[in-house]
Image: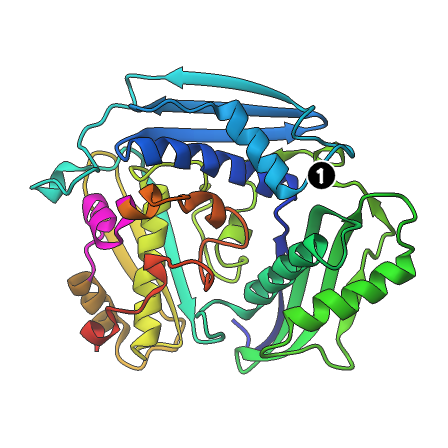
Amino acid sequence: MESEFMFTSESVTEGHPDKMCDQISDAVVGHFLRQDPDARVVAECAVSTGVVFLSVKFRADAAVSVGDVARDVIKRVGYGDDGFSAKNCAVMTSLNELPSLSRRTSVRAAPVDLDALVVEDQATLFGFACDHTATLMPMPIALAHALARQLDAARRKELPYLSPDGKTQVGIEFVGRRPHRIHSVTILASQRQQGTPSPQVLERDLRDVVLAAAFADGLEPDGRTRIAINPDGPIVGGGPAFHAGLTGRKTAVDTYGEFARHSGAALSGKDLGRIDRVGAYAARYAARNVVTAGLAELCEVQLSYSVGLAGPVTIQVETYGTARIPEGEISRRVKHVFDFRLGAIIEQLGLRGLVTREGGIFRNLAVYGHFGRTDLALPWEVSDKAELLV
């Protein structure tokens, strides 16, 4: 990596079709898990003009009206009768209870032998942390999420003429491999009606209400920052009537904004038995603790799993030349402190309680990223193992 470069990351609002699909999928999984923590569920969603399609494969002691769950999410996101409606859209479902999704071992309570709970999919997962921000996330994606969150907040309060669909992008100039200044900010904001407001009023409002609040803390745009708001012209309506959506298509938004590697597998729409979800949380947990312990400025933890085994076949640590002690020693300490077996991850992070508590947590994770969240009490976003690594 060069010492001076520019890097961009994007985020999307909760009404972006891909993100709406993630929220619907996770809401379905959450409803199953709140009734049955042992449930094995894979929920995938697609949306287009006037249509929602849900494929749910499950084995659970639960009754879930997945169509009602989908409509509730669409309504909460904010789609009314303009273009795409929770009331009028067609919800098509494919529900399959498959014996092949058997419960090899219960996740309701810790098994006596944690080696008995084995993974059912091969996967290579990555967790990342860096000291560029207070949340130990790369600055481009952290600021892109802040913009997207503020765009949603403005739509619900000060700027009701906005529709739920939007996208943000932030470019950061790095000097000495550290964030130096904001190079560019791009906002794509859709509006409910043609000509309301005018492009000039929209840009003024977004600068005053969204930009000012999103960059209130930390690095701010300067006089040379390129700010582009709907550079290709007004976007009317947006949402599924404008472009289709699919679960799992925003993995970079969900993880590290492509500043660091991610597995490419969807995080949303999967239960606690899916290692490609919970393993990604465990890898982030370990990487965060390495950086908090002061062992490195940047840390990536790689976990590789094979079908039929409880733990990873490979654990690798990469610090990109920022380690303060030999990298091999960091890897040894990570392996000693953290247990990356599937059952141990569920136990260590308290994931059963996370998904069964009132309101659940999965749907909230499906927008603004699964990592670096300060608005949710996430067990993988703590640094309680840092002292053990020193």
The answer to whether residue 63 is above or below residue 82 is above
Residue at the spot 62% in from the left edge and 62% down from the top edge: 144
Residue 2 seen in the figure: yes
Residue 350 within the magenta-colored segment of the rendering: yes
Q: Main secondary structure of the magenta part?
A: helix
The amino acid type of the residue labelled 1 equals Gly
328 vs 70, nearest the viewer: 70
Q: Quadrant of residue 389?
A: bottom left
Local crowd at mark 1 within 10 Å, few (<14), some, or many (≥20)? Answer: many
Q: Is residue 283 left or right of residue 115?
A: right
Residue 218, given in percent of the width and then of the height, sits at: 58, 79
Residue 314, given in percent of the width and then of the height, sits at: 25, 52
Residue 312 seen in the figure: no
Residue topped by disc 1: 239
The answer to whether residue 130 is above or below residue 356 is below
The answer to whether residue 376 is above or below residue 312 is below
Element under label 1?
helix
Residue at the spot 29% in from the left edge and 31% down from the top edge: 36
Residue 206, given in percent of the width and then of the height, sits at: 77, 63
The part of the chain drawn in magenta is 338-352
